[in-house]
Image (cartoon, rainbow, N blue to C red):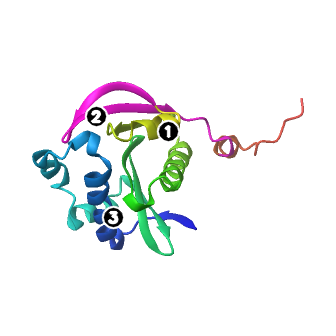
C-alpha cells in the first residue's frame, strides 16, 4: 500500500536516486540520449542539492512510500507551482504519480491557489493532460523544449466554510 507523507532531509538520497533514474529512463522524449543534455539536466541532482530543496521553507515536498521505501516525490513551490513530480521507473503506471499529484493539488487548494502551474517535460504531457491540465505555451528548460501547463483548481468548500464561520450549513432566512 502506498503512503504519502512530508519529505524530510533524510529522504534526500532516495529522492536524488529517483530523480536521476526517472530522468534518465523515463524522459527519453526530452533528452533523446544526448549525453550533453543529460549532463546539464542531472548536474544539480545531488544529495546535497536535493536536501536543500526539501528543507527550503517555501517548498512543500512530499514523498510516496511503499513499505517505508521512498518510491516517488512531488514538490510545490510558491506561488502555486509544481516543481517536482517523479516516480521510481519500476513503479510507473501504478497510481503513485496520480496520488502525489492529488496531494499537491489538495495542498495548493487549501492554500488558496486557484491556478496550479507546472513546466512539464514532453514525456509527462499526457500524464498532466489526463489529470485536467491544459497546455498554456511551449517553453524551454535546461534540458530543452518544455511545456507550460496549468489547471484551474476548484474551491475547497471546507476551507471556505471554515473561513466564513458557516461550516457549510444552510442559513435560515
Q: Within the image, what quadrant is residue 122 found in?
A: top left
Indicate the position of residue 134 as horizontal and vertical percent values: 45, 28
SS at badge 1: loop
**Left or right placement of residue 170 versus residue 134 in this view:** right
Disc 2 to disc 1, how far (Cα)?
23 Å
Disc 3 to disc 1, how far (Cα)?
26 Å
Disc 2 to disc 3, how far (Cα)?
22 Å
Residue 15's disc is 3
Residue at left offset 32%, top offset 55%:
22
Q: Hey, which residue is sitting farthest left in the picture?
A: 36
Start and end of the magenta stretch? 134-158
Say whether residue 29 is visible.
yes
Say whether residue 88 is visible.
no
Instruction: Tell me which numbered mark, 3 or 1, is placed earlier along the sequence.
Output: 3
Residue at left offset 44%, top offset 32%:
150
| Mark 1, residue position | 113
**Left or right placement of residue 34 versus residue 158 in this view:** left
Which of the two residues, 23 or 77, is positioned nearer the viewer here?
23
Residue at left offset 33%, top offset 24%:
137
Q: Within the image, what quadrant is residue 50 found in?
A: bottom left
Amino acid at each position: 500500500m502506498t503512503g504519502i507523507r512530508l519529505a524530510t532531509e533524510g529522504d534526500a538520497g532516495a529522492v536524488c536516486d529517483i530523480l536521476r533514474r526517472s530522468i534518465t529512463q523515463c524522459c527519453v522524449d526530452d533528452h533523446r540520449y544526448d549525453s550533453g543534455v543529460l549532463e546539464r539536466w542531472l548536474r544539480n541532482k545531488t544529495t546535497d542539492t536535493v536536501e536543500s530543496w526539501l528543507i527550503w521553507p517555501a517548498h512543500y515536498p512530499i514523498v510516496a512510500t511503499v513499505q517505508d521505501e521512498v518510491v516517488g516525490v512531488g514538490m510545490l513551490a510558491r506561488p502555486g507551482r509544481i516543481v517536482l513530480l517523479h516516480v521510481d521507473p519500476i513503479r510507473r503506471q501504478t497510481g503513485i504519480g496520480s496520488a502525489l499529484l492529488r496531494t499537491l493539488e489538495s495542498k495548493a487548494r487549501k492554500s488558496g491557489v486557484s491556478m496550479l502551474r507546472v513546466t512539464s517535460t514532453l514525456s509527462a504531457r499526457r500524464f498532466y493532460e489526463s489529470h485536467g491540465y491544459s497546455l498554456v505555451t511551449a517553453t524551454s528548460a535546461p534540458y530543452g523544449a518544455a511545456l507550460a501547463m496549468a489547471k484551474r483548481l476548484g474551491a475547497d468548500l471546507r476551507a471556505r466554510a471554515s473561513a466564513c464561520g458557516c461550516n457549510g450549513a444552510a442559513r435560515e432566512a
